[in-house]
């Protein structure tokens, strides 16, 4: 069992920056992806960015060039540096880790951290 705990959310003005962190406890086995998803009120949860244990990253078009995802495999941590924030980035941000290996099946979520961007 892996527990994910997010931190770093808060209130920021448009154009500002925040850095989200997610710490995973327990062992994470095999080839996997850690990532960030977000859900705004009244909307479905959407992918923000993911990064595999090999370092391959993927971003939503809406955040490309503004957000950067990174991870520390040894510490089971993933980070999201968010720059040039916009009011439409306001959402509850969730950390996720899931297996990409056929040898393991897991898909864990954190409780979320709120990001609010004021105009």
Image: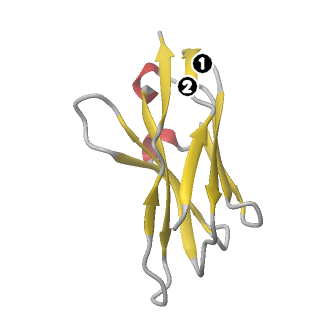
Q: Quadrant of residue 14?
A: top right
Label at residue 111: none
Q: Is residue 65 visible?
A: no
Residue 1 higher or lower than 6, as above or below: below
Residue 6: quadrant of the picture: top right
Which residue corresponds to mark 2?
A: 85
Instruction: Where is residue 87? Give x, y as percent.
Output: 44, 19
Percent coordinates x, y for residue 83 in the rendering? 63, 30
Q: Residue furthest left?
A: 42
The reply to whether dot 2 and dot 1 touch (C-beta < 8 Å) is: yes
Q: Is residue 40 above or below residue 102?
A: above
* SS assignment at label 2: loop
Which label's residue is closer to the chain start, 2 or 1?
A: 1
- Tell me, yes or no, if residue 107 can be seen here: yes
Q: Residue at 42% across / 33% down in the picture?
A: 92
Residue reaching furthest to the bottom: 103
At label 1, counting other C-alpha atoms closer than 10 Å, the crowd grade (few under 14, some 14-19, many 20 or more) is some
Q: Residues within 10 Å of mark 2 (few under 14, many from 20)?
A: many
* Label 1: element kind: loop
The answer to whether 72 is drawn above or below residue 29 in the figure is above
Residue visible at 59% across and 36% down?
66
Instruction: Pinpoint residue 59: horizontal percent, then vertical percent.
Output: 51, 52
* Closer-to-camera residue (78/63): 78
Residue 15 bears which disc, if any?
1
Residue depicted at 45% across the width and 88% down the height: 102
Left or right relative to 22: residue 105: left
Spatial CA distance of label 2 from label 1 is 5 Å
Residue name at image x 69 percent, y 57 percent: 71
The x and y percentages for residue 56 are 62, 67
- Left or right: where does residue 11 sit relative to residue 40? right
């Amino acid at each position: 069992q892996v527990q994910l705990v997010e931190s770093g959310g808060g209130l920021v003005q448009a154009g500002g920056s925040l850095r989200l962190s997610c710490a995973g406890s327990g062992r994470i086995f095999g080839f996997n992806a850690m990532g960030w998803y977000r859900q705004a009120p009244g909307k479905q949860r959407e992918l923000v960015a993911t990064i595999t244990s090999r370092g391959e990253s993927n971003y939503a078009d809406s955040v490309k060039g503004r957000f950067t995802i990174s991870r520390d495999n040894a510490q089971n941590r993933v980070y999201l540096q968010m720059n040039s924030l916009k009011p439409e980035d306001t959402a509850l941000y969730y950390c996720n880790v899931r297996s990409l290996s056929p040898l393991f099946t897991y898909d864990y979520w954190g409780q979320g951290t709120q990001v609010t961007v004021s105009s």
